[in-house]
Amino acid sequence: MADRVFIEGLEVETVVGVYDWERDITQRLVIDLDMDWDNRVPGASDDVKDALDYAAVSDCVIRCLQALQPKLLEHAAEVLAAELQRAFGIEFLRLSIRKPGAVPAASAVGVRIERGRRL
């Protein structure tokens, strides 16, 4: 299937990092999601109940990362991917988490994972 729902540049303020000073502040993470979703039904019905509600997905991402307060982006990505797949029935997703400013010479560093099987 070629249908996707995507969210790009979702900003989340949370505690993240391994250093002691990082555990005392919040930092910005930037999330990109690309999720397999059959858009034919909502395309025909024009009803949000048939769609993957990207506002609900975005709220889930924010709540999950703020509650998790991960040390590693790798851990954040794994937990977040599993939660999104469980909560929304997403078969396959590609997830990127960027941490701007973590390396002064780079605009951002981060991780990208793919989980599940393609429809």
Image (cartoon, rainbow, N blue to C red):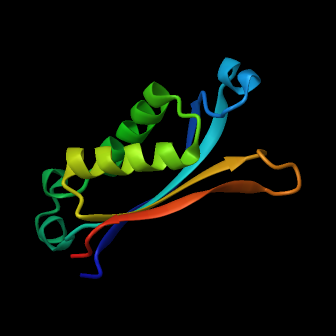
**Drawn side of residue 105 relative to residue 60, left or right:** right
Above or below, 4 against 51 in this view is below
**Drawn side of residue 93 relative to residue 39, left or right:** right
Residue shown at 31% from the left, 42% from the top = 56
Work out which quarter of the rendered image holds the C terminus and state it: bottom left
Residue shown at 15% from the left, 56% from the top = 47
Give how far across and how far down residue 38 sits, in percent.
19, 71
Work out which quarter of the rendered image holds the N terminus and state it: bottom left
Q: Nearer the viewer, residue 19 or 100?
A: 19
- Tag count in the figure? 0
Residue furthest out toward the right: 105
**Drawn side of residue 77 relative to residue 23, left or right:** left
Residue furthest out toward the bottom: 2
Q: Quadrant of residue 26?
A: top right
Give how far across and how far down residue 90 sits, in percent.
24, 58
Residue shown at 38% from the left, 37% from the top = 59
Q: Nearer the viewer, residue 48 or 38?
A: 38
Give how far across and how far down residue 51 sits, in percent.
20, 58
Q: Nearer the viewer, residue 12 or 76?
A: 76
Above or below, 85 against 42 in this view is above
Give how far across and how far down residue 117 sits, in percent.
25, 71
Above or below, 38 against 83 in this view is below
